[in-house]
Each structure stands twice: as C-alpha cells, then as structure tokens.
Image (cartoon, coloured by chain):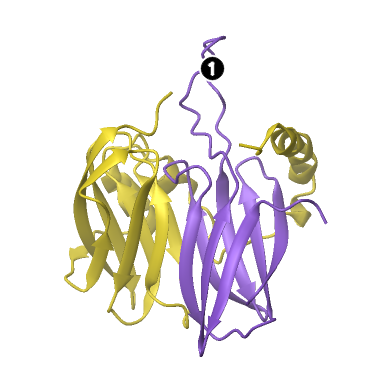
Chain colours: A purple, B yellow
Amino acid sequence: MAEGIIKVKAKSMGEKTQVKMMAKHIMETGQRKDKTTGETIPALYLQELSVVHAGKVVFAANMSTPVSKNPYFSFTFLGGAEGEELLISWKENTGKSATEVAKIR
Amino acid sequence: MSMTRRSVIKAIATSGALLGLGVLSPRLAFAAWNEKAFRAKDQGTAMQELLGGEPQPSAEILLKAPDIAENGAVVPVTVSSTLSGVESISLFVEDNPTPLAVEFLLPPGTDADISTRIRMGKTSKITAVIKAEGKLYSAVKEVKVTIGGCGG
C-alpha cells in the first residue's frame, strides 16, 4: 500500500467513536504566485473525503481551497469498537484518489 | 514540511491515468462535489447552488470560532447543533474569493458536532448552514483577521 496522507486518531468511547483526523495536504489555492517566476501556482486540493465503518459511510466532506493546509476534521459517530477498521477515502481536484485504513483504539 | 515534492509529483503523474480510467475513481460522498457552488464568487450564489434556498437564523446552532484570528491561514471552527435530523453542515466565509469552504454530510448516527480549520483572506463573517429534516438553518459569527491566509 502506498504511503498514506491521512493521520487518524479514532477512540472508542462506549457506544460512540470519536475520530480526529488530519490529511497531509498542501491545499494550494491557485491564487499564489511563484515569487521567482511570477507565475500563478496551480490549485491542488482535496475535494472529497469519506469515512466508512462496517460498510456504512459515517462521515463525508466536500471541500475546496478555503480549507486550511493539512485539513483537520473531528466528528463522533454511534458504533465502532476497539480494533475495528475505518476506511478513509479521499480524492483530489486532479482526480487522484486513494483509500487508507485506520484502526479504532 | 516533508509533504512533498514526491507526493505532488506522484499526484501529477497518476492523475492523468486515473482520469482516463473514470471507472476506477470511486464516488466517495453521497452528494457529489458541487462545482457551481464551490466555484461561486459570492455567498448568496454559493448557498443557492449548494442548498437551493436561504437559511433561517437558528439559536440551536452553536458556531465556535475565535473573535480575532492572528493567522487567517488556520482558523479553528467548531459547529454543533441540538437540531434533530441534521443531514449536512456547510461553512461559508463571506469575504473569501470563493466563500464555500466545506460541506459535511452527516448520516444518521453521526453527531451534529464537527470541527475543522479554515482559511480567511481577511476579516469576515463565517456562516454555518445546517440542513435538518429538509430545512435550512444558519448561525453567523464575525472573525477579525490580523494576517490574511489566502494570498502569497
């Protein structure tokens, strides 16, 4: 599996699971200029992110460049237990996408 | 930062291939990325395109953000609500070049309580819009920005 960009802290808290995650991503806005060439740096950002637990989507986000570099999200869902897996899928504006796996602790 | 030349180059290299194989790019979210809404340059258009209406102010939404953000590049925002049947939470920054920042889709079982970090180009109002049981509600907070986070 390719090196992931998503760091996840998923903690089982009784009936619920709290998820905190950060995607290592530049979220380039497409508005900055290269200081040496003066050319605009093209936009490069995460567009979609979803988290699946036990075959069910528990969280999804559509986003654009007003989301900070290294996007951070936290949420809590009903269900989940220690040792179970979360599947985190993401997609860039370039079309690049991947799915990563994290364990609930 | 170690992110990264390598991953950026890889992104560029693989994106072409993935676009060609449209079949392989999974439909991740249950509402697709709304291009018109995310590219809209004013908040009214973005809201209309994304949600198809105007929200009513609601005291049942708690929008937490700093009064003053020293660094507009990273403004922490938390939205929670006591409304029932929350389907989505969207965040708009009125004075950003494109106001719509993010749309969270919350299936039943996921709490209406999310946190994230957004960019603000300058002092602006942040609006959180919640769709619950088909209706739209909003909460607004102004955040003063000392150093903008959009430009170079």
- The quadrant in which the N terminus of chain A is found is bottom right
Q: Quadrant of residue A90?
A: bottom right
Counting from the top left corner in percent of width and height, residue A102 is at 68, 68
Amino acid carrying label 1: it is Asp
Counting from the top left corner in percent of width and height, residue B60 is at 21, 74
Q: Residue furthest right?
A: A1
- The quadrant in which the C terminus of chain A is found is bottom right
Q: Residues within 10 Å of mark 1 (few under 14, many from 20)?
A: few
State left or right for residue A55 relative to residue A35.
right
Q: Residue furthest bottom?
A: A15
- Give above or below for B110 relative to B5: below
Counting from the top left corner in percent of width and height, residue B96 is at 32, 37
Q: Quadrant of residue B52?
A: bottom left
Residue that mark 1 sits on: A34
The count of marks equals 1
Indicate the secondary structure of the residue bearing disc 1: loop
| Residue at horizontal 30 percent and vertical 61 percent from the top | B129
Counting from the top left corner in percent of width and height, residue B132 is at 33, 75
| Residue at horizontal 55 percent and vertical 55 percent from the top | A22
Please state the chain letter of the residue tagged with numbered disc 1 in the rendered image.
A
- Give above or below for A44 relative to A79: above
